[in-house]
Amino acid sequence: MAQTAAPTSGGTADSTAKSAAARTTASRPSVQRAASSTLQLTYQTESGLSYRPDSEPDVYARERCQLDVYHPVGASAAPTVVWFHGGGLTGGNRSIPSALKGQGITVVAVDYRLSPKAKAPAYIEDAAAAVAWTFKNIARYGGDTNRIFLSGHSAGGYLASLVTLDRRWLAVHSVDPDRLAGLVPFSGQSITHFAIREERGLARTRPLINDLAPVYHVRNDAPPILLISGDRNHELLGRYEESAYFWRMLKEVGHPSVELLELQGYDHGQMAEPAFPLLLRFIRQQAK
């Protein structure tokens, strides 16, 4: 385990945030272009791509099961990050994190169905479907199918962790999760998510570990993993301790490449900003 330097001013724990801004879903893919002076590459965003079949009968699934792809134009074999937004599985919308722009990588930002309108395992199935879509399609956007990384903040980190460690979700799409190049959850729950507990009438403060908990599926042959948490004194709902337990159990089963970083002085909401450079460093390390 390791710790990073604290910010100039500490924060306090904040509650699970729902997105305050509504996002209008595009009816057809739109394209935006931006130039990167750093890498001398031009980047393009393809928006509103559906990762569910056109025949999907669920109207809500058709509305939510879309993604955006941000990619360097003309590149080939670029590392790809599939990014799942946070929001407690009850809110939030996809966006390309600004810290990942202009970095020579392809980013897939995913929307998924939300509770309580959808209940478990709907959003887990959506996360797996989006990853399967990425394996099937990312080469056309210059992405390398051998270098696909899963990441996300909070609820997004939970989804990324579960579909990486529990083989059954991607197996539905004939994808082996061990093809993933790595997993980097930002303050993701490792026990069964509190939104799922609430769906089942349990208090969010009552811990539960069942087959919907990433830690339930620890195994020594999973892809390389970097766990990033905020400060244990400022984090949400014991999130650091969950990450530490996740790390310990992965080590106990003999996982050869798992690290836990604690971002001292940063609370649950603040920790994402300093975590992005660590994600980028991890991607570059795995590429060596």
Image (tube, rainbow, N blue to C red):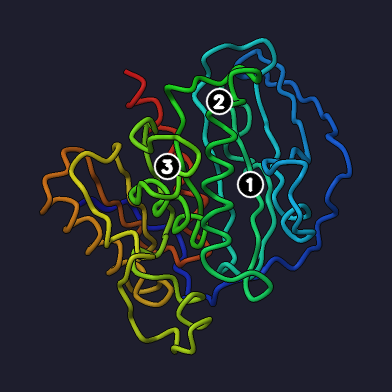
Find residue 49 and report its horizontal and vertical position in percent: 75, 38
Q: Which residue is mark 2?
A: 105
Compared to residue 16, the image places residue 225 above or below, namely: above
Exactly how many numbered labels are in the figure? 3
Which amino acid does the dot numbered 1 rest on?
Val
Other-residue count near label 1 (Cα within 10 Å), few / some / many at <14 / 14–19 / ≥20: many
Give the left or right position of residue 205, taking residue 139 as reference.
left
Q: Which residue is mark 3?
A: 171
Compared to residue 206, the image places residue 20 above or below, namely: above
Give the left or right position of residue 17, taking residue 231 as reference.
right
Give the left or right position of residue 279, taking residue 98 as reference.
left
C-alpha separation, residue under disc 3 versus residue under disc 2? 26 Å
Which amino acid does the dot numbered 2 rest on?
Ile
Provide the secondary structure element on which disc 1 rests. Answer: strand
Q: Which residue is mark 1?
A: 110
Find residue 226 and report its horizontal and vertical position in percent: 32, 45
Provide the secondary structure element on which disc 3 rests. Answer: helix
* Front of the two marks 1 and 3: 3
C-alpha separation, residue under disc 2 versus residue under disc 1? 16 Å
Q: Earlier in the sequence, mark 2 or mark 1?
A: 2
